[in-house]
Amino acid sequence: MPRVLIAAGGGRVARRVAAALCAAGEEPPRALARDPEKTRGVLVDADGAPLPVDVVGGDLTDIDAVGRALEGIDVAFLALGSSPAQVDTEKAFIDAAADAGLAHLVKLSVADPAPDAVSSVLRWHAEIESHLVTRGIPHTLISPTTFADVIMLAAPSIQANSRWSGTAAHGKNALIDSDDVVDAVVAVLRDPSKRGGRRVLSGPAGLTWLEVAEALTETLGRPITYDEVSVEERRAQLGASGLDEWRVDLLLGLDEINRAELYRTPTDTVEVLTGHRPRTIHDYIARHRAAFAQ
C-alpha cells in the first residue's frame, strides 16, 4: 500500500480513515497534528487500544512542518472540519505540499461546490479547490452529499420531544452515511487506479426530512415529527442556543441545499469505489438508536 499522510489526523473522518488503514494490515499511516498527544488519544481501535499511527507534531500552515511530515509519503489525505478558518488552513497546507513535491492529494470536499452557492460550506470548498488546481498537485476530490450524521444535531430534541424542526420539509437530499465516506476514502488511498478527478458520493436514495422522520418512526417504533418553520424562526432558535453566527449560517445553508435539491439524485460512486452499496438512512438510525431513545 502507498505510504499515507493524514493531515489533521484527529478529525472525525480522518481518525476513522486512520483506523481503517491500520486494520488493512499494511504499513500504518503517518498523521500530522498540532497537538500530538491529544491526537494519539483519539487514534484508537474499537477496543480502545492505541493505533500504530506515526503521529508527528506540526501546524498545517507551517511549511517546514508539512515538508518534514511529507518525507517518504506517496499520498496525503486532507479533511478539516467546516469552519471559517478551513479555507486559509487548507490553502496553506496545499501550498506547503506543492512546494514539497507531493505526488497526490486526496481532499475531502463537497458535491457541487461553487463560489455563488447557497451554502457557505460549498463556497468555502470552491475556493479551496480553485487554489488546489492553481498549485497543480495531482488530486482526487472526494465530494459527498450532506452527511446523514447531521441528524445527530437533532438527537436531543428527538429524544426528549419526538420531534425536531428545520426550514426544508420537502426538498430531497441523497444523504450519505459517513461510514461510506470513510470506506471510499480508504479505497482511493489504497488503490492508485481509483484516483483522479471528482468522486461524488451519495446515499442510495433522495429523501426529504419528512421521509427521514418516517424512517425514524419505523426504526424507533414511536411517532417522530419534523416541523417546518420559517428561516427567521430557525435562525432565532439556533441563535438562542448559543451557536456562533457562522455556525447558524452553516446550518441554515444545509437546509438551503435541500430546498434547492442540489443532492436529489443518487450516484453509484460508493459501490464503484468500495464494492458495496451505500448504507441506508434506516441503517444509520439503527446504529445510533441509543441517541434517539427515550
Image (spheres, helix red, strand yellow):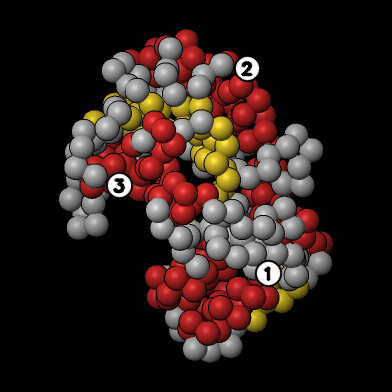
Q: Is residue 75 visible?
A: yes
Percent x, y of residue 272: 47, 49
Q: What residue is drawn where x is 68% and y is 75%?
A: 210
Q: Amino acid at mark 2?
A: Thr
Mark 2 crowd level (few <14, some 14–19, many ≥20, 10 Å Cα): few
Percent x, y of residue 269: 52, 49
Q: Which residue is mark 2?
A: 134
Q: Secondary structure at mark 3?
A: helix
> 173 and 278: which one is in front?
278
Q: Amino acid at mark 3?
A: Ala
Residue 1: numbered disc: none
Looking at the image, residue 226 lies above or below residue 223: above
- Tell me if label 1 and label 3 are in contact, CB under 8 Å: no
Q: Is residue 65 visible?
A: no
Question: For the residues marked 3 and 2, what is the alpha-carbon distance in whole angstroms?
Answer: 31 Å
Q: Secondary structure at mark 1?
A: loop
Q: Amino acid at mark 1?
A: Thr
| First of labels 1, 3 by sequence position | 3
| First of labels 1, 2 by sequence position | 2
Question: For the residues marked 1 and 2, what is the alpha-carbon distance in whole angstroms?
Answer: 37 Å
> 270 and 46: which one is in front?
270
Looking at the image, residue 60 lies above or below residue 292: above
- Tell me if label 1 and label 2 are in contact, CB under 8 Å: no
Q: What residue is drawn where x is 49% and y is 14%?
A: 98
Question: For the residues marked 1 and 3, what is the alpha-carbon distance in whole angstroms?
Answer: 31 Å
Horizontal side, residue 114 vs residue 90: left or right: right
Q: Which residue is mark 3?
A: 20
Point out the residue furthest to the bottom here.
222
Q: Quadrant of residue 207?
A: bottom right
| First of labels 3, 2 by sequence position | 3
Q: Which residue is mark 1?
A: 208
Horizontal side, residue 103 vs residue 266: left or right: left
